[in-house]
Amino acid sequence: RFNYWSNMLEYIRMMGKVGVDWGHFESSNANVLINDTIMMINYLMAAMTTKGTMGTLTNIQQQLIPDMIWKNKLTLPNEYSGMTRMYVLSPRSMILTKDGDSMEYDIQLMILSKAAPSVSDITVYYRELSSN
């Protein structure tokens, strides 16, 4: 949980810095604006664990990037540059029916990486929680 909040607070800090960069934008500081935007997106992606956070990222890409980057004829790299991480999207805490029988559960595994990992490289460990 610490990493989530650390990354989310860094994302919010960088969002403010990008706003200041954009407010004082001149072509001479274009690299600062681009680098700060990349860092902001990487922090958000590092904090991503829910579909809501994915929606925030989509909103940034559809609203902020076209207005700020493309209209000024700037470009962002097309690849993910953050650290490699894997997470289960919105994990369920209970997998039982009303009758107490267990049910099948498919997980949605999200992987962020600079290089696409092979499916054979991925191992998911799980355990049943005790009833105590």
Image (spheres, helix red, strand yellow):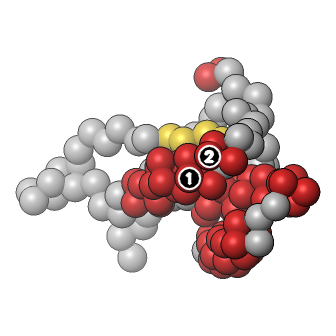
Q: Look at label 2 and name its amino acid.
A: Lys
Say if 129 sits above or below 19 in the image.
Answer: above
**CA gap, disc 2 and disc 1:** 6 Å
Q: Secondary structure at mark 1?
A: helix
Which amino acid does the dot numbered 1 rest on?
Asp
Q: Residue at x 77, y 64 (%)?
A: 25
Q: Residue at x 43, y 41 (%)?
A: 108
Residue 67: mark in rendering? 1
Q: Position of residue 126 (x, y in %)?
A: 52, 49
The answer to whether the residue labelled 2 contacts the one labelled 1, judged by CB atoms less than 8 Å apart, is yes
Q: Residue at x 9, y 57 (%)?
A: 99
Give the percent coordinates (x, y) of residue 111: 61, 40
Q: Quadrant of residue 6?
A: bottom right
Can you see residue 81? yes
> Quick check: can you spot residue 127?
no
Which mark identifies residue 131?
none
Q: Name which residue lies at 70% across and 26% down.
A: 116
Q: Position of residue 49 (x, y in %)?
A: 51, 58
Mark 2 — residue? 71
